[in-house]
Image (cartoon, rainbow, N blue to C red):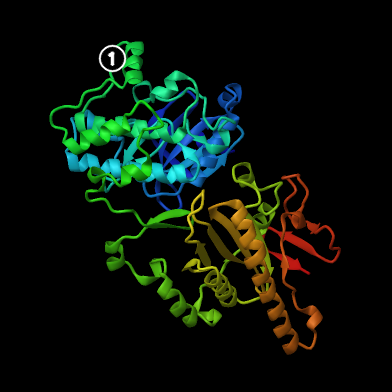
Amino acid sequence: MAEKKEKGNLVLGRFELGKLLGHGTFAKVHQARNMKSGEVVAIKIINKEKILKGGLVSHIKREISILRRLRHPNIVELLEVMATKTKIYFVMEYVRGGELFNKVAKGRLKEDVARKYFQQLISAVEFCHARGVFHRDLKPENLLLDDNGNLKVSDFGLSAVSDQIRQDGLFHTFCGTPAYVAPEVLARKGYDGAKVDIWSCGVVLFVLMAGYLPFHDRNVMAMYKKIYRGDFRCPRWFSPQLITLLSTLLDTNPHTRISIPQIMSNPWFKKGFKQIKFYVEDDRVCSFDYKQLLHHDDDDLATSDSEVEIRRKNTCNNASLPRPASLNAFDIISFSQGFDLSGLFEEKGDEARFVSSAPVSKIISKLEEVAQLVSFTVRKKDCRVSLEGSREGVKGPLTIAAEIFELTPSLVVVEVKKKGGDKAEYDKFCNSELRPALENLGIEESASSSSQSPHPQSQPQHRTLSDSALQIHSDTECLYPREMLLPQDGESNFEFSSEKLPIFTI
């Protein structure tokens, strides 16, 4: 059925395909429109058969993992991953301005414009390196421009992660675009992924300012010799400060080549540079924009630290909060690993779910209390709460998203997910802070209900809803009205109906 819809320019009945933006050996990229929201996106369509024959399954999984790890204003966002029997779909942010290459092809850029793009490129590369990701194919063709003229790094198909480093601490895969590849890659003796990206950034900067490549020859081997020797000349319009920076970027010795912190403290680079401040909400990157603060309603904005306490006091009763989204049978089925397709693409163990009879307002207040104890920033929107740590780890600050769903009129599910940061730190936070707090809330709520009810045994108890507690039959054609027993609890069951919410009984 999905394949038929695809042929009619519909992908899984949700996205209407538009013009072809580009294509390669294994994939093609189309502009598309979300039929429900109207949002314009780019969809990368990958042929499963071709990647299987090419032995690229691990390559595709790594690309998905990398893109999910990177949420930055200067990096193209992966919004969603879908799949059919024959295709894999990457739903990406659509960047309307096209490639930076097309802008440079018309002639060299003014120094201030080139500097702005270089600053944004270095900001994105620094973010990647801090999370153990190395692009390895930085060039103007992989740098896109949005409506506001801001740079977006794309195409992480050749990227590597720190897990791939060998025992000598280096990468050994020969890859990249010839004119932008670093000399140590050509030597085939192993290389530092961060230093290779810095070399490519130097070549990009030279191209933006000069309008042509620093190392160029019709004969590829002759060009490689120039790269290996670092044989390039700066045109007369380059300023002394720029020439000095380029000489350190295009240093053939990776050990003495400039580092990212040194680049960011360079006088030429620092001119007019402002560090981007952003946060992730609803799995989307949001930048702090003063103009938006002036023109948007308060309800559309993420709350600041000072606003959190004020709003918490104003949301003491459930009536002031929107009703949580309801879960249907298929949502609950998706909690089981057997049916959750996202398990094919996301790291396991990065999410947890809790069932509680506590009011939404109390759950949100409890999350805020936990955040305050560990000095986390809190952002709220409807029944979603984002907790953001301030300590910058190897994989960035720990970011946790909690969302509340209605299971029945008297029960809710609190779904907690790690959106960024180190997994070990996330596990420690959940086990020592979050889980005890939610369990204590359940005990308090049960005690309160018991004191008010003549039949305390009939009150729903707070409990963890784990994947193992939702094991169901694997026959996808038998999803309709049936009773499903939860293992290790003979009194618990679900009743599924196509016309009503599932009944959860404990």
Percent of width and height locating residue 360:
58, 74
For the point 75% across and 48% down, which residue is it? 478
Residue 75, visible in the rendered structure: no
Pick the quarter of the image with the C terminus.
bottom right
How far across and down, in percent of the image, does residue 396 sit?
49, 52
422 left or right, relative to 504 = left
Q: Is residue 78 above or below residue 183?
A: below
Three-letter amino acid code of the residue under disc 1 = Asp
The residue at 33%/38% (across/down) is 144
Is the N terminus in the top left, top right, bottom left or bottom right quadrant? Answer: top right
Left or right: residue 26 compared with residue 295: right
Place of residue 216 in the rendered image (x, y in percent of width and height, measured from the top left): 28, 18
The residue closer to the viewer here, 159 or 103, is 159
Question: Which SS class for mark 1?
Answer: loop
| In-front residue for pair 314/170 | 170
Q: Residue at x 54, y 68 (%)?
A: 374
When asked about the image quadrant of residue 344, the answer is top right
Image spot of residue 119 (x, y percent) = 29, 44
Which picture quadrant has residue 234?
top left
Q: Which residue is mark 1?
A: 217
